Every structure is written in structure tokens, then in C-alpha cells.
Image (spheres, rainbow, N blue to C red):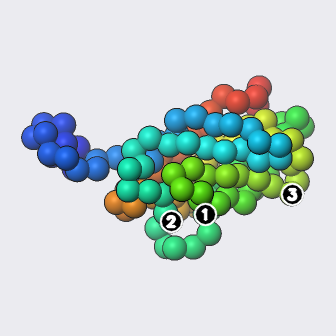
Amino acid sequence: MIARAKTYGQEVEYSGPVYESYKIEGGKIRLKFVNSKSGLTTKDNDALKGFAIAGNDHKFYWADAMIEGNEIVVSSKQVEFPIAVRYAWASNPVCNLYSGAKLPASPFKPMIGRV
């Protein structure tokens, strides 16, 4: 798909969602992605898996994540004021975020706080 897009100039999606930016909203973190023209979904139409957030204690906790349009909102009952988020950050991660074109998202851990 990359060759079709980059070499042959065809208008096809060739990458899954890639983390672009975040915004902390109280007890939640809102994530934006590039390469998500066809929307965000899960591979198995199940709840999102593989997201974790940390607060000032610098401990990561598994988080609830919801798709809202082309963004994802992440929160956890164990983290009142999140300062960091990560996705698929493990040796053998259980994760399921995909684009509408059924291409998987890349793991990420942006530098939000000092975690």
C-alpha cells in the first residue's frame, strides 16, 4: 500500500493512525491522530484495549478509552489528574486500535509529563 501511494501516486491509505497531539481535559486526555481519514475503529468492534495513563505518582494504570470522531478520550478511575498516556507499550501488547481502512495504529508514548 505504501508503494501504491508513494511510488505510483495512487490515493490509497497506507498507514494506520499515528499519534499527533494531546489535550488534558480535567481527569481525561484527548488524543488526536493523523492518517485517520476513514475514521477510527477497533479490529474486533470491541472496546479499545492497550491504553494506560499515569498521574503525578508516575504509575501507569490501564485506562478506559472511547472513540469520539477522529479522537480518543482516555481516563482511569485510579488517576484523578493524568499527566501521561501510552498505547501498546509492552513487549507483547494487547491492543486493537485501527483506522477505518483496517490498518493498525502504531504504539506511542508521548512526552506529556515527566513520566
Q: Residue furthest top?
A: 114
Image position, residue 90 (x, y; %) = 61, 49
Q: What element carries label 3?
A: loop
Query: Residue tagged by mark 1?
Result: 48
Instruction: Identify residue type, mark 1.
Output: Leu
Quadrant in the rendering for residue 83: top right
Q: Is residue 81 left or right of residue 21?
A: right
Image position, residue 56 (x, y; %) = 88, 35
Q: Residue drawn 67% across and 52% down?
A: 73
Q: How far apart are marks 3 and 2 (CA)?
A: 22 Å
Q: Which mark is residue 77?
A: 3
Q: Residue drawn 38% across and 56% down?
A: 38
Q: Residue 42 carries which label?
A: 2
Quick check: marks 1 and 2 in contact, CB under 8 Å?
Answer: yes
Image position, residue 86 (x, y; %) = 65, 43
Q: Residue drawn 70% across and 52% down?
A: 74
Query: In this rendering, does residue 22 appear at all?
Result: yes
